[in-house]
Image: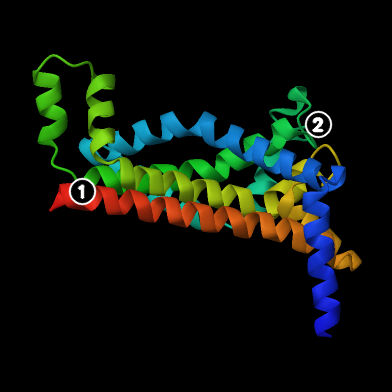
Amino acid sequence: MNEGWLALMQQAFSLLLSLDPDVWSIISVSFSVSFAALIITLIPSIVLGFFLASYQFPGRWFVTNIVQTLQSIPTVVIGLLAYLLLTRNGPLGDLRWLFTQEGMILGQMMICAPVLIALSQAAFSSIDKRAYETSRTLGASWQRAIWTVCRELRVPLLLAVIAAFSRILTEVGCSMMVGGNILHHTRNIPTAIALETSKGDFAQAIALGLVLLILAIVINFAIGSLRGKAMPRSQ
């Protein structure tokens, strides 16, 4: 049994190191789609999180609770909603994005946005509001003032970005329903792991799992380093 696992690990590393085209196509699709969804969603979500944390307005409580609720919705339900939007008879059917990377990006944006909004709202709520007001008093535009506050909160905001990216990079349900798991086109790491495991091709599943494991280790070390550098300033 141990020899079997050792052989599987050797095959997995071989697939990665030999630049197997199927494996690296899956990795490329996964990261390109998730990065695109994150980049498109990032600035609007952080700005909305800032305004929810900084201003009182009618309906603020309702919006905040909707955002928090959306975080807990299973990704397969979000995938169903995206599917209904993109199907031929749906409101966005004319875009023909169903079973395309564009459709996957839309679905992942719907997953990513609530996480970014809620976590950035929490981060902005933890800072003295006078930082923004002082910047505005000194003549800074609202965009520049928000940027100043973001610099002070760079570690918690970076944690929010990483949490959102991790959620969309590892989700299965939405990508499977909207993307269709098409090789070299919409098959990403989570859907490939699920498929290859069901087929009994554990070597490729392990290889793709190792990519996610290495990414998690790198991110955690980077976050630990950032926290260590930020800590003396806060003391």
- Quadrant of the drawing holding the N terminus: bottom right
Nearer the observer, 16 or 141: 16
Q: Is residue 106 left or right of residue 126?
A: right
Q: Position of residue 192 (x, y in %)?
A: 79, 54
Q: Which amino acid type is marked by label 2?
A: Arg
Q: Position of residue 118 (x, y in %)?
A: 38, 47
Q: How many marks?
A: 2
Q: Is the residue marked by circle 1 packed among few (<14), some (14-19), or many (20+) residues within 10 Å?
A: few
Q: Could you tell me which residue is drawn at 82 percent across and 57 percent down?
A: 14
Q: Position of residue 33 (x, y in %)?
A: 66, 37
The answer to which image quadrant residue 142 occupies is top left
Q: Which residue is mark 1?
A: 126
Q: Which residue is mark 2?
A: 88
Q: Secondary structure at mark 1?
A: loop
Measure how far apart labels 2 and 1 are at the Cα level.
45 Å
Nearer the observer, 67 or 2: 2
Residue 89 at least partly seen = yes
Color style of the picture: rainbow
Q: Could you tell me which residue is drawn at 72 percent across and 47 percent down?
A: 175
Foreground mark, 2 or 1, reads 1
Q: Which amino acid type is marked by label 1?
A: Ser
The answer to which image quadrant residue 212 occupies is bottom right
Q: Is the residue marked by circle 2 packed among few (<14), some (14-19), or many (20+) residues within 10 Å?
A: some
Q: Could you tell me which residue is drawn at 46 percent across and 33 percent down?
A: 42
Q: Secondary structure at mark 2?
A: loop
Q: Is residue 222 left or right of residue 230?
A: right
Q: Could you tell me which residue is drawn at 50 percent across and 33 percent down?
A: 41
Q: Is residue 72 left or right of residue 139?
A: right
In the rendered structure, which disc, 2 or 1, sits on the residue that comes first in sequence?
Answer: 2
Nearer the observer, 142 or 81: 142
